[in-house]
Image (cartoon, rainbow, N blue to C red):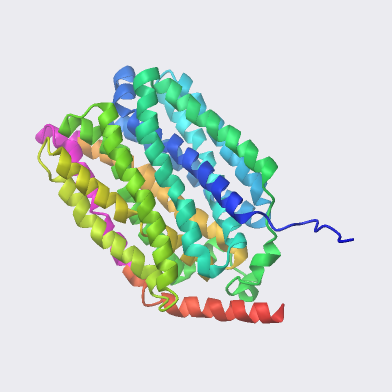
Amino acid sequence: MTTPNPNPVPRPRYTLALLTALSALAFMDRQILAVLIEPVKAEFSLSDLQIGLVTGLGFALTFAVLGVPLGRLADRSERRSIIAWCRGLGGLLGAAGAGAGGFWSLLASRAGGALSDAGGGPASMAMLADLYPPHQRSQVMSVFGTGGSIGALLAMVLGAWLAQHYGWRAAMGLIGISGLLLALLLRFSVREPLRALAQACAPHAATHKAAPRGAVREIWANPVTRWLIIGAACALLAGYSFGSWNTALLVRRHGLSLQNAGWVSGTAALVSVLGGLLSGALTDRLTRRDARWQIGVPLIGLGLALPCGLAYLMLPPGAIAAATALVVVYAFFIVWWVAPTYAALSLVVAANRRATASAMVMLAGAIVGNGIGPIFTGWLSDVLSVSMPGDGLRYALACMVAMLAPGFYAFARVLPAYPAAYHASRRAATQALNAA
């Protein structure tokens, strides 16, 4: 009689699918306010700056306080429970926004909803790194990364439809409750993977285990991880600013209805899913021949997204076909940095640093991208609209999209240093496997 294994290996594909679905709902909850800007602004008589504060500041403040501590907790504790609690409570707090009575209560709801990503995102990526080997990790991270694009798609299409037919409060409440229910499913249907399985493949596991510095200082001191975080922050600044305001731009500049603007943005979000999946598969394939492609793929993506984004913003009013084409191409390439970057982090930091490293990237995105980006865009739109009526938002977004240029520079700084770090990690993994 065979004794059952008390710690069976989790079902990786099921776990990946569920974690991706939770990420999609969390991003849908975060992105829904971008769809609801016009009705919320009209009901509460808010300025563009106040909208920027609601969409960015609340999330940024919560993530700034909780992101890295929850990442460190995920490196030491059961990640399944951390993901379930954070995603569930985040969804519940996000749903509370349906009862908002004004600017401050809406801001509080958005701040609470950020708990979902602060704890759920880094723990999910660390969990997936334990479930899949290094040569599959870019593709796995690309699948998980599609959660953001799927969430944006759902927000733009389903969220816009719900808001138009049932009101913005019903849309916000339904999304939050859905996240809570899916978090409960995760808690009771997914097993925690054994960390010991990952330690054999962890780069520099032995040296990092005894490192005297704290995790954050150790990660930031490494030039590869530091420039990856800086590059990601610039890309997130451009991406979140564009995503938060593009629906409003389509309504204001091109005269689209809220639902039609949602369809255009939703199409772009769908294409970005394909772009993210392709970037992960392409990276895993190309890095078998040359490790530099782990950074080369993000460089190609940012290099092509930048001119497409700027060209889109320079179109004349009413150029719907050209606007749709350019925003779709922009969306396809803007996500090419995501999966290779998170996979690269998992290959150059120790297993007991993965969630923290991912949290640092997400923290940069929360503060710089989701925090400063929408706020600064709203403020700049208000300022520029005084001297350029009707064009303030367009030029404000052009300034944000231009941040892809320093992001490109940051990834270019990583390129020459990455191969040595990558090959060192593979040697350490081989030695650990032989020793085991």
At 65% across and 69% down in the image, what residue appears? 199
Quadrant housing residue 212: bottom right
Quadrant housing residue 278: bottom left
Quarter of the picture containing the N terminus is bottom right
Instruction: Name above or below for residue 431 compared with residue 283.
Output: below
Instruction: Name above or below for residue 2 compared with residue 28.
Output: below
Quadrant housing residue 384: top left
- Res 423 visible: yes
For the record, the magenta segment spans: 382-411
Is residue 399 located in the magenta-colored stretch of the structure?
yes
- Res 406 visible: no
Measured from the top left, where is residue 31 in percent x and y? 39, 37
At 67% across and 42% down in the image, what residue appears? 187
Measured from the top left, where is residue 353 in percent x and y? 58, 62
Is residue 135 located in the magenta-colored stretch of the structure?
no
The rendered magenta stretch, by its main secondary structure, is classed as: helix
Give the camera-side residue of 50 and 357. Answer: 357
At 29% across and 39% down in the image, what residue appears? 265
Measured from the top left, where is residue 436 in percent x and y? 72, 77
At 40% across and 77% down in the image, what residue appears? 417
Instruction: Name above or below for residue 212 compared with residue 38.
Output: below
Give the camera-side residue of 355 and 344. Answer: 344
Q: Is residue 382 left or right of residue 290?
A: left
Residue at the limit of the structure toward the front, as seen here: 1
Q: How many labels does the image show?
A: 0
Residue at the limit of the structure toward the right, as seen here: 1
Measured from the top left, where is residue 192 in percent x and y? 68, 53
Q: In this view, does 4 lie to the left or right of 244?
A: right
Q: In this view, does 319 lie to the left or right of 306?
A: left
